[in-house]
Image (cartoon, rainbow, N blue to C red):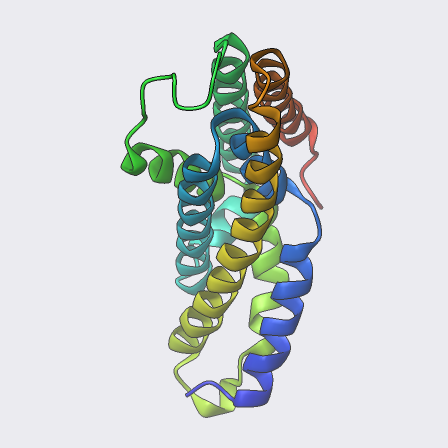
Amino acid sequence: MVDLQRLIAFCAMSLLLSAIPGPSVLFVVGRALAHGRRAALSSALGNALGGYALVVAVAFGLGTVVAQSALVFTAVKLCGAAYLIHLGVQALRSSAPEIGAAPPVPGRRRIWEGALVGVSNPKSIVFLMAVLPQFVDRDAGGVIVQMLVLGLAGALLQLLSDSTWGLTASAARTWFGRSPRRLTRLTRTGGATMIGLGATVALTGRPD
């Protein structure tokens, strides 16, 4: 079982880190500005699922392979960066004349896109490897189960935080939607945000 005090401490740290604008927040905000509320919420859910997949990888030792191998680390990083840039370019190419005018994209696809971005973030792997084990009570046994439970709590808090950011950004998009020209500019701003985020991830060095 997970110690309650350790769980609360980990949740507090996760909530604090999730609330600070970073790659996860910028991705969801970019999707909200480019595509609206549903896309933002689906992306937040997918991103949280991708983040939890990293927790599972760290719990079973796979995260060590990525973190310690320069080749694997770089490959994962560049794949995530390339996909972010791809999504940003898609947003830039859309004119978005009015809200709801563009063909709807299935929610499952949005979730999958968010999960792919979340699971390909090597910075999250390094963070989880450095922080997650510190909150595990090894004397209590069930180390893997403790990591999975702690990681699940962190993922849920990340989902809550990212969704709040996404709803806030989508509310601004709704206001901008009263003017097709302003909405088009906002959509492209969201696309540019994702491209910039992808470039930042690509240029991020491997921690030693």
Location of residue 81 by image quarter: top right
Is 175 on the left or on the right of 142, as rendered?
Answer: right
**Who is closer to the viewer here, 182 or 117?**
182
Depth check: give the residue in front, 185 or 199: 185
- Using the image, determine if residue 141 lies above or below residue 122: below
Residue 138's place in the image compared with 82, above or below, is below
Residue 25 vertical position relative to residue 137 in the rendered view, above or below: above
| Residue at image location 62% in from the left, 35% down from the top | 172
Where's residue 39, x and y in %?
Answer: 43, 35
The relative height of residue 80 versus residue 151 in the rendered view (above or below) is above
Q: Residue furthest front?
A: 178
Q: Which residue occupies 43% across, 56% down?
A: 52
| Camera-nearest residue between 2 and 153 | 153
Report whether residue 77 is seen: no
Residue under the image location 46 percent in, 71 percent down: 147
In which quadrant will I find the N terminus? bottom left
From the viewer's perspective, tell me whether residue 54 is left or right of residue 85: left
- Residue 136 visible in the picture: yes
**Relative image position of residue 19 (x, y in whole percent):** 66, 56
Task: List x then y, in percent, for residue 37.
Answer: 47, 38
